[in-house]
Image (spheres, helix red, strand yellow):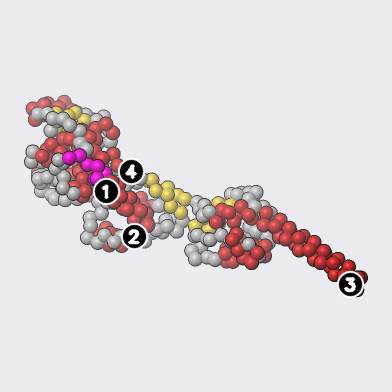
Amino acid sequence: MGRVVKILAVLLILAAVAAFAGHRYWQTRLEAPLEVAEPTLYEVPEGAGFHRVIGDLAAQGIIGDGWAYRLLVRLEPEAVPELRPGEYRLTPGMSGRELLGLLDRHERITYPLTVPEGWTFAQMRAALAAAEKLEHRTTGLSDAEVMARLGREGLHPEGRFFPDTYRYHKGVSDLALLRQAMERMDRILAEIWTGRAEDLPLETPDEALILASLIERETGVAGERRRIAGVFTRRLERGMRLQTDPTVIYGMGERFDGNITRADLREATPYNTYVIEGLPPTPIALPGRASLEAAVDPADGEALYFVARGDGSHHFSRTLREHNNAVNRYIRNR
């Protein structure tokens, strides 16, 4: 009997040693470096499960022991990553455990898309259409159809998207980026509108958005935005037409060839502020935060006119006579 007990004890010890050795071997296979000699992109397909990804990595020779990863599901289910589609960068020396961490943290490769302040919606759509790795769902759709897909049917798209640099990973759609930019503009416009100055000649946040787009198109000089907003505000208060060239250009559309003639200034379009009273019906560009803030907090002053100097800045005038002199100096002589 004593001998049987000793044999059983030895067998238990051997089994424990074997189990420990097996577990340790399993761990070493997970900690082994991937078979990549240079930075390599691996794409997790949409809807792919853990077993499919492991099989794919093994088939590509990136990992050599697929069984070690599949064993995670039973022995360490908490270590099995929740997969998200996209591209992941695998680097030489990266271990299997590090790969699992990379997948679990969803550290996908991203690409930038920059939408500058002052761009039109048409320019934004062109940039989206040219963006690599982006899923293009709006190709062939009209602007109205795009807005309907975004849940804003009947809303003019101009000015409704916040200009900034957005990052996306492969598989993200252009609609998703548009929705992100649209919702961001909604939030920023609402925030800025709540902090607006008193007694503005603006009734709604949409009117502030329109005015901000005029400011954005008139100047890129940061220190002038509130001054230009002040000129526009005083003209609105006095019932004067805004008479700003960017609205003429926007109203001309594709006919604009880089020059504005006297006939263009007299042409009756819905946007020509030399002809219409008050603000144009919609924004004419994508305004940034600084222009939005200027629209609701214009600078005090008496200037009612401004003209471009030709260096990006403007000359501001209080009277029409002073303005005409400035026009002669900066425009006609040039």
Q: Earlier in the sequence, mark 4 or mark 1?
A: 4
Crowd around label 1: few <14 · some 14–19 · many ≥20 (10 Å): few
Q: Earlier in the sequence, mark 4 or mark 2?
A: 4
Judging by the rendered image, the residue that carries numbered circle 4 is 116
Residue 245 lies in magenta, yes or no? no
Judging by the rendered image, the residue that carries numbered circle 1 is 190
Are the residues flagged by discs 3 and 2 in contact, CB closer than 8 Å?
no
What amino acid does circle 3 point to?
A: Val
**Quadrant including the C terminus:** top left
Secondary structure of the residue carrying tag 2 is: loop
Judging by the rendered image, the residue that carries numbered circle 2 is 138
327 left or right, relative to 82: left
Query: Residue at (76%, 60%) from the top-left corner?
Result: 20
Residue 67 placement (x, y as % from top left): 67, 65
Instruction: Please tell me which residue lies in front, 111 or 292.
Output: 292
In the image, which disc is placed on residue 4?
3
- Residue bounds of the magenta highlight: 192-198
Are the residues flagged by discs 1 and 2 in contact, CB closer than 8 Å?
no
Secondary structure of the residue carrying tag 1 is: helix
